[in-house]
Image (cartoon, coloured by chain):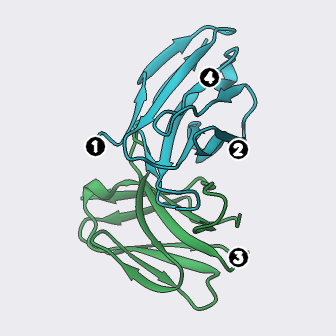
Chain colours: A cyan, B green
Amino acid sequence: NAGVTQTPKFQVLKTGQSMTLQCAQDMNHEYMSWYRQDPGMGLRLIHYSVGAGITDQGEVPNGYNVSRSTTEDFPLRLLSAAPSQTSVYFCASSYYTGNNEQFFGPGTRLTVL
Amino acid sequence: LAKTTQPISMDSYEGQEVNITCSHNNIATNDYITWYQQFPSQGPRFIIQGYKTKVTNEVASLFIPADRKSSTLSLPRVSLSDTAVYYCLVGGYGGSQGNLIFGKGTKLSVKP
């Protein structure tokens, strides 16, 4: 199993551009989520999904969209990038909702100029 | 979800046992206590989880007193490779939400 994979590893955007961060897992996990981590901070939850076709907002959802058309994939879309979205983004998954053992991807480092 | 409080940083030397304590005064009845480890430029990694008393695995031990208002992660005989940030989280297990709340964690520095 590849586990949780994320692409790209690094990305530089200009203010106002849009892009999609990809996340995939091959463990047939029900629950998937996106976090952002700013320097010296813990992780903050952006959006999460408890199954295909079901998504919900986390702590900091503004400026981001998600969809979950399949169990495996959970892309995060930045609609109009802003410098405040410069961060490291982590995708995570777990066997089922409420399982606190989450598997994290390697992260995507995003810089918005 | 219960808030947690843990030291911002700790220093240790190779071969020592390290104990990181976390307080969670508002822990709910169905909350489990979970610890994660994060190395620089990597995603967090699950270390251990428990509900009460003591849990031990190949990496660490977790001690939880009867009132469950605190917990202690114990790392036996640390090495330089244990230098990382350690996060304590509390959350429901098997409930309707799988959301985890990460604080700033404890930055552990292991010196030779």
| Residue type pointed to by label 2 | Gly
- Measure the alpha-carbon separation of dots 4 and 3: 34 Å
Front residue of B83/B101: it is: B101
Marks 3/2: CA distance?
A: 20 Å
Are labels 4 and 2 assigned to the same chain?
Answer: yes
Mark 3, Cα crowd under 10 Å, few <14 / some 14-19 / many 20+, is: some
The residue under label 1 is A1
- Within 10 Å of disc 4 (Cα), the crowding (few <14, some 14-19, many 20+) is some
Instruction: Look at mark 2 in the image and give the residue it sits on.
Output: A58
- Residue B26 position by quadrant: bottom right
State whether residue A107 appears in this view: no
Element at label 2: loop
In contact (CB < 8 Å): disc 2 and disc 1: no
Q: Secondary structure at mark 1?
A: loop
Q: Amino acid at mark 4?
A: Arg
First along the sequence among labels 1 and 4: 1
Residue type (three-letter) at the residue carrying disc 1: Asn
- Where's residue B78, x and y in %? 28, 66
Residue visible at 51% across and 34% down in the picture: A70
The residue where tag 3 is placed is: B28
3D distance between C-alphas at marks 2 and 1? 28 Å
- Residue under label 4: A77
Q: Which chain is disc 2 placed on?
A: A
Q: Name the amino acid type tagged 3.
A: Ala
Q: Secondary structure at mark 4?
A: strand
